Image (spheres, rainbow, N blue to C red):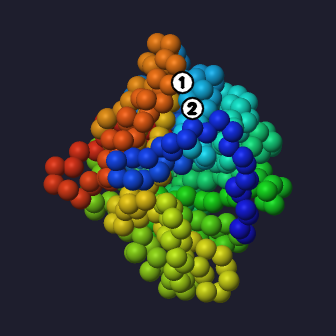
Amino acid sequence: MSVPATRSAASPGRVAEPLVDGWGRTIRDVRVSVTDVCNLRCTYCLPESGIAWLPKDERLDDDETVRLVRVLAGLGVSTVRVTGGEPLARAHLPALIERLDAVPGIEEISMTTNGVLLHRHADALVAAGVRRFNVSIDSVHQRRFAELTRRDVLPAVLKGLAALDPYRDRVQIKLNAVSLRGITEHEAVDLVGFARERDLQLRFIEVMPLDADGAWTEDHVLTGDEVREIIHARWPVEALPRERSSTARVWRFLDGGGHVGFVSSVTASFCGDCDRIRLTADGQLRTCLFAHDETDLRAALRGGASDDELVALIRGAVAAKQWGHEIHKPGFRPPARPMSAIGG
Ligand code: SAM
């Protein structure tokens, strides 16, 4: 089901100059990691143990997060994706979301979650203003799910998805599955069957070199094309035109059974019209998932920076945004932080 999730809003407080990078790309979207803590230990993301979470005082508090989003909205950023870590591991998240949703110029709040705690918070999150949920689910088989996430919690995720059912007329729900060679070949058809039964769009995301163990190699990637061939053999699909700045290429089931998406970050990157920046839980601005540089907005905030000073810092960082990831270039170095600490 396609739900028009973006509300149209006037944007009081906008500054004249939008946020444009050195390649001419206008920034409209910020991914806000509200915590680095996660309640799963997905093999392609986190180590099994020995994780040093950020001390609480190093994480931005609600006032700091709202202020930075307000400054960004003043520069034309209009959509916020709340992520983590696991965003629902942060206490009182609906209260923060309600404040973010009220920032002038912010037109849409979305959230990426593993869904484990969703059944407890779905009502409050929808009431607070979340209009799009991406729920991560790499397998619909309990044992395989537990192997991949190192936690036996698939039933909780299913309960979380069910808790969103009453809101299907006003929120958009998509599923994310990371695509891993040797695993997803066996999971893809059942995952898609699960999504089709519930009229949800599933997106396969090629696994990226963002694992905490630094073990990624290209051999780990089951490519979007390969997954699509598996799906196509069961339910034929045809490509839809790519939407501007979209991370996913979307295909339509010819039998009318909805859509399936492919985020082929490794084999068919989509950096050319990237409109995204990221704010980590400790207040670092990152202009690319694969950037090596971060801009310390937390230090500026806590050092008493004015809004104009924050704007200057943000503009400087965005002007230097790299063109794209360089996974295929010789000498590629993954970022120092794993996906969980950057905010997926
Ligand atoms: N905890 C939340 C969740 O699981 O959806 C939000 C954060 S998580 C980092 C966001 C997304 O990134 C999830 O769909 C997760 O599967 C994906 N992810 C994590 N590590 C990845 C990697 N190395 N390559 C590709 N996707 C990854």
Q: Earlier in the sequence, mark 1 or mark 2?
A: 2
- Residue at 31% over, 35% down: 293
At label 1, the amino acid type is Asp
For the N terminus, the quadrant is bottom right
- Residue at 38% over, 58% down: 271
Mark 2 vs ligand 1: CB under 8 Å?
no
As helix, strand or loop, the secondary structure at mark 1 comes to helix
Is residue 42 visible in the rendered image? The answer is no
As helix, strand or loop, the secondary structure at mark 2 comes to helix
The crowd level at tag 1 (other Cα within 10 Å; few <14, some 14-19, many 20+) is some
Of residues 215 and 183, the one nearer the viewer is 215
- Residue at 73% over, 53% down: 8
Of residues 65 and 194, the one nearer the viewer is 65
Q: Position of residue 213 (x, y in %)?
A: 32, 41
* Residue 194 location, quadrant: bottom right
Please determine whether, in this image, residue 251 is positioned above or below residue 301: below
At label 2, the amino acid type is Val
The crowd level at tag 2 (other Cα within 10 Å; few <14, some 14-19, many 20+) is many
- Label disc, if present, on residue 71 of the rendered structure: 2
Tell me if label 1 and label 2 are in contact, CB under 8 Å: yes
Please determine whether, in this image, residue 19 is positioned above or below residue 96: below
- Label disc, if present, on residue 18 of the rendered structure: none
Give the CA separation, mark 1 to mark 2. 7 Å
Left or right, 170 with respect to 236, comes to right
Is residue 251 visible in the rendered image? The answer is yes
- Label disc, if present, on residue 307 of the rendered structure: 1
